Amino acid sequence: MDELVEQAREVQEQAHVPYSEYPVGAALRTTDGTVFVGCNIENANYSNSLHAEEVAIAEAIKGGHREFNRLAVSSARRDGVTPCGMCRQTLAEFCDESLEVVCDEGDDEVTAYTLGELLPNTITEEMLE
């Protein structure tokens, strides 16, 4: 089993998902090998819910990390869930298009993408100038 996928699976147990009953875990690895994990945290006001990927990247940024090379995402359904558009844009703020995104398909199966494949033509800081 891929170690990063395993960490994404394990953190799902901490998810707070009383509305969707769809736990998601994410494990984000920095270029120095440090791993930060996150799980989804739902709120009755859905717009205030936190996604697993954004929780993981927030922990990493809080810890002073700004360089990442791999992200694993897993849902309890093992359905190959990918980061949503909002999370893709958040990742693009801190990661380049070569970030490897590994999505858990169950058993030992994963589908791998780059962030650039998942979010082509991303909104960048340069576009806002």
Image (tube, rainbow, N blue to C red):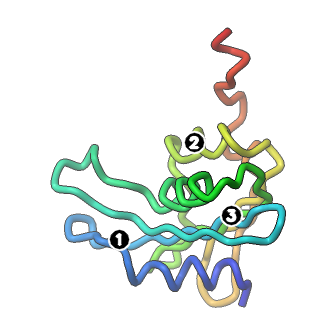
Tell me the residue at 56%/54% (across/down). 62
Residue 16, by quadrant, is bottom left
What is the C-alpha distance between the residues marked 2 and 1?
21 Å
- Checking the image for residue 22, the label placed there is 1
What is the C-alpha distance between the residues marked 3 and 1?
19 Å
Residue 117 horizontal side relative to residue 75, left or right: right
Mark 3 or mark 2: whose residue is earlier in sequence: 3
Q: In this orientation, which residue lies closer to the viewer: 40 or 64?
A: 64
Tell me the residue at 60%/81% (across/down). 7
Residue 44 x/y as whole percent: 16, 55
Examine the rendered structure and indicate whether residue 38 appears above or below residue 65: below
* Amino acid on which disc 2 is placed: Thr
Residue 77 x/y as whole percent: 45, 78
- Checking the image for residue 71, the label placed there is 3
Tell me the residue at 69%/43% (across/down). 94
Mark 2 or mark 1: whose residue is earlier in sequence: 1
In the rendered image, which residue does mark 2 sit on? 90
Residue 12, by quadrant, is bottom left
Residue reaching furthest to the top: 129
